[in-house]
Image (spheres, rainbow, N blue to C red):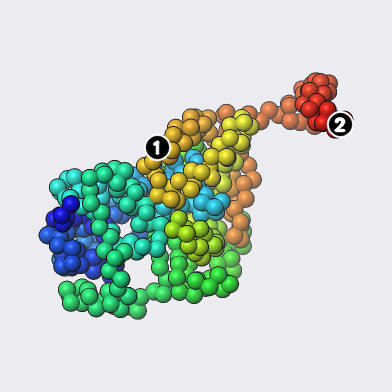
Amino acid sequence: MGHAKKVVLAYSGGVDTSVCIPYLKQESGVEQVITLAVDLGQGDELEPVREKALKSGASESLVVDVKDNFIKDYAFPAIQANALYEQRYPLGTALARPLIAKVLVETAAKYGADAIAHGCTGKGNDQVRFDVSIAALNPDLKILAPAREWGMSREETIAYGERFSIPVPVKKSSPYSIDKNLLGRSIEAGILEDPTVEPPEEIYEMTKAIADTPNEAEYVDIGFTGGIPTSLNGNAKNPVQLIEELNQLVGNHGVGRIDMIENRLVGIKSREIYESPAMLVLIQAHRDLESLSLPADVTHYKRGIQETYSQIVYNGLWYSPLKGALDAFIQQTQERVTGRVTVKLFKGNATIVGRDSQYSLYTPDLATYGADDKFDHKAAEGFIYVWGLPTRIWAQH
Ligand code: ARG
């Protein structure tokens, strides 16, 4: 294989990814490091990040805004799949990685790089998501993961960086490990590593404490077209706008926090805190609209594959053939998932209180207990005779 000469590095501006720049050049014989910072709505100023990469020795420093792409092509399909890993985590971090990998691979092609690098450690899911996604998109690219092999402690990493004039973090860095984008935040480490301890209020940014939420309920109407959220309270929204506004609205009522013990792909159990207000409410509303507009068998069958879908996404297999096949099934089911769902937000709860669809399969004169009931009660007898036949025969022996 030989040494990689030109590398595209996934860059966040933090100490670890900054130290990767001199490390790749000194220890891995790389000649040119091109950094790529991807804007997924994490809210960081990216111009300083761009300059920091150049100061740290990058030959080229790129920033790309992929927010629209992220919501349309990664978050919305996950909503259509009602994807919740282990029934709870709406996959905010897991959905971002395949998109970052895609932009890295495209950038490598554009700049004639022969390798891609990232700053993931060897303990997490993100390294798997990057490595597998990159390989799926271009199996010829080398992958370098300096932080997986260098074995430096935090102090050693900082000291290594100082030798190459990478500034020491000014403020005492947060005890938490945080990943953030438009879909939410993941907070790990520090005191949170003790699963018996309640998370301190300071870790939350997108969701209010119940004590600080409004004392009056607020209602929001979410409109869906073909399983995709397209409006809030009757006003059409573009994808990024919709997520941003809903995060605000829902988080304001203290909805969207998750505290869970999670099974990582690498075999470790970890205590994870998330806040993901918009995604949680969108999945809840979408699932409700499906109950109205999909036949029973399709609904039930789809529920059965959702668990698999979430595992595939969590486990880094976004670009796998099984994922593609499940997508095709899911897309086929979404055609009539059009309508609106009314969500009531109050004191940490999001409750669906109404739903409506032009494709509603709910039939009032079949469902009613009133006088205009059109259901043929006598037909039930023959149906039950046949339906219960195997059970009756079994009981006779
Ligand atoms: N446990 C979550 C996941 O695997 C969050 C990971 C956060 N990543 C990070 N680099 N801080 O999707």
The vertical placement of 278 against 30, above or below, is above
CA gap, disc 2 and disc 1 = 48 Å
Residue 181 % position (x, y): 39, 56
Q: Is residue 297 above or below residue 237?
A: above
Q: Quadrant of the C terminus?
A: top right
Q: Nearer the viewer, mark 2 or mark 1?
A: 2
Quarter-of-image position of residue 295: top right
Please rate how many residues cluster around mark 1, counting C-alpha atoms within 10 Å: few if below 14, some from 14 to 19, many from 20: few
Q: Nearer the viewer, residue 346 or 147?
A: 147
For the image shown, how many numbered marks are present on the structure?
2
| The residue positioned farthest toward the right in the image shown | 396
The residue carrying mark 2 is 397
Quarter of the figure with residue 182: bottom left
At x 45% / y 51%, what residue is drawn? 314
Residue designated by label 1: 321
Q: Look at the numbered disc 2 and say if its residue's Cβ is closer than 8 Å to ligand 1.
A: no
- x, y (%) of residue 27? 18, 67
Q: Is residue 252 visible?
A: no
